[in-house]
Image (spheres, rainbow, N blue to C red):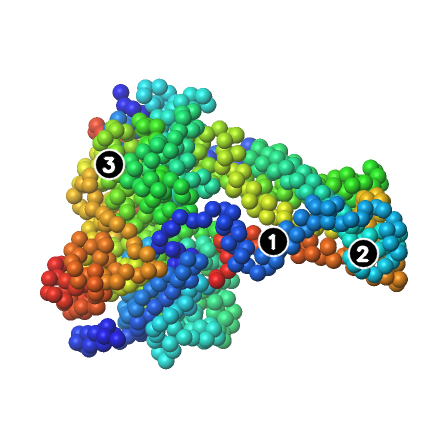
Amino acid sequence: MSEQKLMHSSNAMRGDDHVPLMLIEELSVDFSTARGPIHALRHISLEVAAGRILGLVGESGCGKSSLAYSLIGLLAGNARITHGVIRLGDDDLAHLSAARWRELRGKRIAMIFQDPMTSLNPVRTIGQQMMDIQYRERITRAEKRKFAVDFLAQVRIPDPEARLDSYPHELSGGMRQRVCIAMALLTRPDLLIADEPTTALDATLEVQIIHLLRELQQKFGCSVIFVSHHLGTVAELCDDVAVMYAGEVVEQGSVDEIFRQPAHPYTQALLECDPGSIREATRILPTIPGGLPDLRQVPTGCIFQDRCPQVFERCRREHPGFHLGERTQMARCHLIEQGEMTP
Amino acid sequence: MSLLEVDHLEVRYRRLGRVKAALRREEATFPAVADVSFALEAGRTLGLVGESGSGKSTVAKSLIGLQPASGSIRYGGREIGSASQSEWQRLRREISMMWQDPVGSLSPRLSIASLVTEPLKIQGHKRSSDDADRLLSMVGLSTDLGSRYPHQLSGGQARRVGVARALALDPKLLIADEPTAGLDMSVQGEILNLLNEIQSRTGVAILVITHNLNLVRHVTDEVAVMYLGRFVEQGLTDAIFRHPRHPYTEALLSANPSPNPDERHGRTELSGEMPSPFWRPAGCEFHGRCPHARPDCADIVPGWTGEGERGYACRYPL
Amino acid sequence: MSQAQATVSLPEPTVISRILRGLAGNRTGTIGFVLVVLILAAAIFAPWISQYDPAAIMTGPRMAPPSSDHWLGTDNLGRDLFSRVLAGGRVAMLVAGASLGAALSLGLVLGLVAGLGPRWLDNLLLLLFDALRSFPTIVFGLAVVTLVGPSLFTVILVVAITSVPIYARIIRTQAQSLRNAEFVMAERAMGAGLPRILFVHVLPNVLGPLLILASMDVPLVIATEAGLSFLGMGVRPPTSSWGVILNDGYNFIRNSPWPVIAGSVPIVLVTLGFTFLGEALRDIFDPRLQKAN
C-alpha cells in the first residue's frame, strides 16, 4: 500500500512534536442499502494529537459525522467498518468487543450531539442525570452532587445548585448544550467528540459555546474532535483541521496553514463560498457547481474531478495520494506533486 | 407610495386563559411583536434580522394573514390588516412566502410537478405539465424532478422548488423565511444568486427573514434588526454594515466566526441569552446583555433616534 | 441519522412495487400476504369450492373424521365441516369488513373534528371516547345483545362502536400535528381552503397508518365475533361461523376432536396472516422502524 507508506514517511519527515492520542489508519466504512453498498468512508488516515482540537469540516454527505460516530462505536446498524484500524492506547476501536466499548465510552471517549434536547432524558432532572453518569465513581451521593454543581458552574450555568432540579425542557437550547458539555467532561475523557454542537444555536450563542469549549479543553487538557460544516467556527476553535469531501480527507494540516493557504481546490472553493467571509457586498455569490459523485460506484481518479476548475487528464485516471505542502499541510491533489500548487 | 407599509404592528400571544387572568388580575396576553414599522418599495429587498424568539417570523405570518395583529399593514395603499377571507384569497396571488423548512413545507404525498403548480390550481387557473416544466427550469431544476416526491430531493433542490412555487403566480411581494437554513455553504450562494436574479428580472419586492446578519449583506438594500419583538436598528444595508450604531447590531455582525485567521479578534461577545418576551426587562430591554451598558440603561427606555431611513433605539450609540 | 443518507437519489419505485418488494424481502410478510390472499379467496369463492350446502344436515355420517368426501369431516348433525368453515370465513370477513369499515369512516370524521375543531368540542369528544373505551368489548357486546337481540348485525354494531374511539383518537393526534405542520401553513398561505387542505394534504398522510392498524385489528374483530357466537350471542343458526362451529364441536369434543380443530385453525391462520401482513406493511412504510438489512 503505497499510500500508507507515504503517510508514514511524511509523518517522519515533518518531525511532529505532537503526541498522538488516537491514530486512524486506512479506515473504510460501508453503508449497506437496498441498492447496494455506499462506500461512505474510504481509506481515512488521521491523527488526533493529545491536548489539541481537531476540526472535521465538510458539506453534508462528506462523511464527517460517520467518521465521528465510528470513533465512538455508534455507527448506524447498516454500517460496517470494512478496513483499517483506530488506535487508542492498546485498543483497536475498529475491532472492539461490545463489553470493551462500554468501558471506553464515557470514560476515555465522550460525545456531545447537535440537538441537546434529544440527548438528554426528558423525564429526569439535570441533577439526576449528572449523578447517574458518575456511576463508576466510588463516592457518596453528596460528593457526586458536589461534582455536578461544580461542573455546571464550570460551563457557566448561573445558579447551578438550583438548576440541578430542573428538567431539560425548562432550559434554553444554549443552556442545554452547556449541560451536555458538563456531563461529557464530568467523566474526564481523553477524547471529546462534538458533532455540530452549535448548529442548532443562534449566532451569538454559538460564539459563547465555542469559547467555552476552548477554555474547558485547555483546562482539562483533553483532545477534542469538532465536527462542523462551518469553516469560521472551525477556524476559530480548532488547532488542526481535516477537510472532507465525499468520504475522503482531501486536505489536512494546522488551522493556520489551511485557512491561510488552502492547497486543495475544494478547500479553496469552500472558503470562497462562505457568504460571511465575503466582505464586499456583491449580488453574485460564488458557488461550487455540480454535485457529489455516487458513492456506490466510486469514480476512478480524483474524487473532486467533476467539480474541480483545475482538472486535467491525470485527475481522471489516477487517484491522488497525499502530497506534502508546506510544513504539516497535506492535500490529495496532483497539482501539488507537480509543484503547481496555487494557494 | 410604497408597496408595503407597516405601521405600529403589534402581535400579542395569549399566556393565560381569560378566566384565570381575571382571577389573578394579570394580563392574559403579552406582546411578541411590538411597535414594528417599516416600508418596502417594489423591486427592493428588506432584511429582517434577529435571533430565535425575536419575533421576526411572527411579523412574516401577520403579513400573509396567518397571524392576527393590531396596527396597520398597508399593501398597495390599501389596509389589509383587517381584510376578509375573500380579499385574502385575491391578495395571496400577489403576496407569497418561502418557508423555513425546505422539505417540511412541501406536502409529502404530492409530486414535485403538482407542488410547484399548486398555487395555479388553488387560484383556479388551469395547470398543465408545461407549467411545471417552465417553473422548474426557471429555478434551474431538471424537469425530470417533476415526477419525484419531496423526501427524494436534497435540501438545495427542495429549496429551489420552494422558490419556484412562491413565484408561480408572479407575486409582487415575496417573503423568504430563512432562505438558506440547513443548506451547505456552496448551495447558499446558489439560492441567494437565484433570488437576486429573479428580482432584477421581475421587480418583485423581497422581505428576507434571517438570524444571520452576514447573509443579508449580499441580498438586501435595507436591514432592520429585531430584539424581543422590537426594532432596535434600521437602515440601508451598506450604512449598517459600515457603522452599526446599536450594540446588538454590532454583536450580531461580529458573531460570525470568520475563516480568516487574521480576523479572529476584537469581537463583541454577548453574555447571557435573550429573555422571554413576557418578562421584559425594564429600561432598555437589551441592557442585561449589552457590553456597553451604563447604569441608567436599566431605568430609561431608549427612544427611537431617526434621521431619514436610518434609526436606532439606543441612548449611547456606538 | 444523517450519516446513512444516500448521496444520490434515483427515482424511487411506486407504492405498489414498494409494497411488493418489501413483502418479498420479509419472510413473515410473505407468509402473511399469502395467507390473507388465500383466506380472502376462500371466503369469496366458497360456494364454488365446496359442493355441500353448509346448512344442509346429514350430508354424510355424523361426527365423521376427515375423508375424501368430507375434507374436514362432519359435525354432530352430519353437516360438512369444510363448507361450514368456508361459510364461517365469509361471515368473519363480512363482520371484519363491515365493522372496521364503519369504525374507520366514523373514526375518521370524529377524529378530524376533534383534531381540527374548537377546543371544547375536542374535550367533549375525548370524554365520549374514553367513556366508550372503559367497557370491555365482550361485556359491552352482551349488553347490546340483550337490548337488540343476537344477530350478525348486532355483532357488526358492537365491533364498530367499540373500535371507533381507537381510530378517532389516532386520527385526532395525527390531525393535530399536521395542523401545525409547515406544509399545511404553506398551503394556507397560498390560499387553499379547508376542503383542499383536508382531502389533498391531511387525509393521505393519515390514511396509510390507519389502514395498517386496521389490518392488524382484523383478527381481533374475528375473535370478538367468534367469542360472541361461541356464547350464543352472535350469528344465529343455521348460519355458520367459526365461533358457532367451535361451540357445536365443544359439546362433543370427547366423541370427535375434528369440529373443534376445524373451527379453531382458521382463527389461528387469520390472526397470523393479518398480523404478519400488518407488521410487514408498517415496517415498509415507517422507515424509522426499518431494520438494517
Q: Amino acid at mark 2?
A: Asp
Determine the chain carrying the residue at label 3.
B
Disc 1, SS:
helix
The residue wearing badge 1 is C33
In the rendered structure, find residue B184 and report the number of the disc placed on it.
none
Disc 2, SS:
loop
In the drawing, does residue A165 fall left or right of residue B281? Answer: right
Q: Are marks 1 and 3 on the same chain?
A: no
Instruction: Note whether residue A77 is visible.
Output: yes
Placement of A136 over or under B49, stated as above or below = below
Residue at 67% x, 48% y is C40
Q: Amino acid at mark 3?
A: Asn
Mark 1 vs mark 2: in front: 2
| Percent coordinates x, y for residue C54 in the rendering | 81, 47
Report, in whole angstroms, how far the alpha carbon at label 3 lies from the one at label 2.
83 Å
Disc 3, SS:
helix
Report, in whole angstroms, how far the alpha carbon at label 1 lies from the one at label 2.
30 Å
The residue wearing badge 3 is B196
Q: Residues within 10 Å of mark 2 (few under 14, many from 20)?
A: few
Task: Tell me the quadrant of the picture where the N terminus of chain C can be found.
Answer: bottom left
Determine the chain carrying the residue at label 1.
C
Mark 3 vs mark 2: in front: 2
Cβ–Cβ under 8 Å for marks 1 and 2: no
In the drawing, does residue C246 fall left or right of residue B147? Answer: right
The residue wearing badge 2 is C69
- The quadrant in which residue A252 appears is bottom left
Cβ–Cβ under 8 Å for marks 1 and 3: no
Q: Nearer the viewer, residue B305 or A97?
A: A97
The single residue placed furthest to the bottom in the displayed view is A90
Determine the chain carrying the residue at label 2.
C
Instruction: Note whether residue B243 is visible.
Output: no
